[in-house]
Image (cartoon, helix red, strand yellow):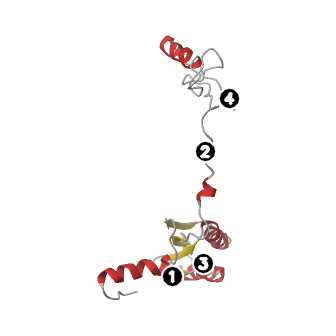
Amino acid sequence: MTRDVRFVGRVHEARAKRAASNPTRPWMPRSGRGVTNHVGLAGLSLRSRPAEPDLREQEAEGDAMLFQLTMFPSVKSSRSGSSSAAVAKVIDIIDRSGLPYKLGPMSTTIEGEWDTVMKTINKARLTLRREFPRLYISITIDDRVGAKKRITGKVESVEKRLGRKVSK
């Protein structure tokens, strides 16, 4: 995928000619080709740049991530204004997924791999969207290489430092 660049102006034109004659930097602009756009560039030649690594290859199998999820309809779901029925549907989907999770008063923490957890979150989202035109969804992710059993391990680590059990 090679694109050419032409700079506008004499100074830029001279730089482009020097760059075109320098074989060690072929990704630099080359003059005299292409049509310039409003910023003076028609493209860049990226021939000798290394290919971007496939980030999916870097993810180790079995690395558990923590997902903190808050999901509820942003419109009233009952006369009392309670969203507990909708939240219960989300928790049911998470529970049936088999993923380790911990329910809290303001959010739910789920442990698992990216694809599995995101598939579960999306299933819950689509379930609520059938009933509600607008949802509030907040996801916070803790991604640590090599970590396992983090949903309990993080609390145990703090308890160990304190030398006592804490309220759970």
Q: Which residue is mark 1?
A: 102
Please tell me which residue is depicted at 56% across the width and 26% down the height of the picture.
Answer: 25
138 vs 54, left or right, is left
Please tell me which residue is depicted at 65% across the width and 17% down the height of the picture.
Answer: 33
Callout in the foreground (2, 1): 2
Q: Are marks 4 and 1 in contact (CB under 8 Å)?
A: no
158 vs 23, left or right, is left
How many angstroms separate mark 2 from mark 3 (CA)?
Answer: 37 Å
The image shows residue 37 at horizontal and vertical percentages of 60, 23
The image shows residue 136 at horizontal and vertical percentages of 53, 67
Of callouts 4 and 1, the N-terminal one: 4
- How busy is the neighbourhood of tag 2: few (under 14 within 10 Å), some, or many (20 plus)? few
How many angstroms separate mark 3 from mark 1 (CA)?
Answer: 13 Å
Q: Which residue is mark 3?
A: 90
Q: Secondary structure at mark 2?
A: loop
Of callouts 2 and 1, the N-terminal one: 2
Q: Which residue is mark 4?
A: 2
Of callouts 4 and 3, the N-terminal one: 4
Q: For the residue marked with disc 2, what is the amino acid?
A: Glu
Q: Nearer the viewer, residue 121 or 62?
A: 62
Callout in the foreground (4, 1): 4
How many angstroms separate mark 2 from mark 1 (CA)?
Answer: 37 Å
- How busy is the neighbourhood of tag 1: few (under 14 within 10 Å), some, or many (20 plus)? some
The image shows residue 41, relative to residue 139, as above or below, that is above
Residue 52 is marked as: 2
Q: For the residue marked with disc 4, what is the amino acid?
A: Thr
Q: Secondary structure at mark 1?
A: strand
Rendering quarter of residue 115: bottom right
Rendering quarter of residue 29: top right
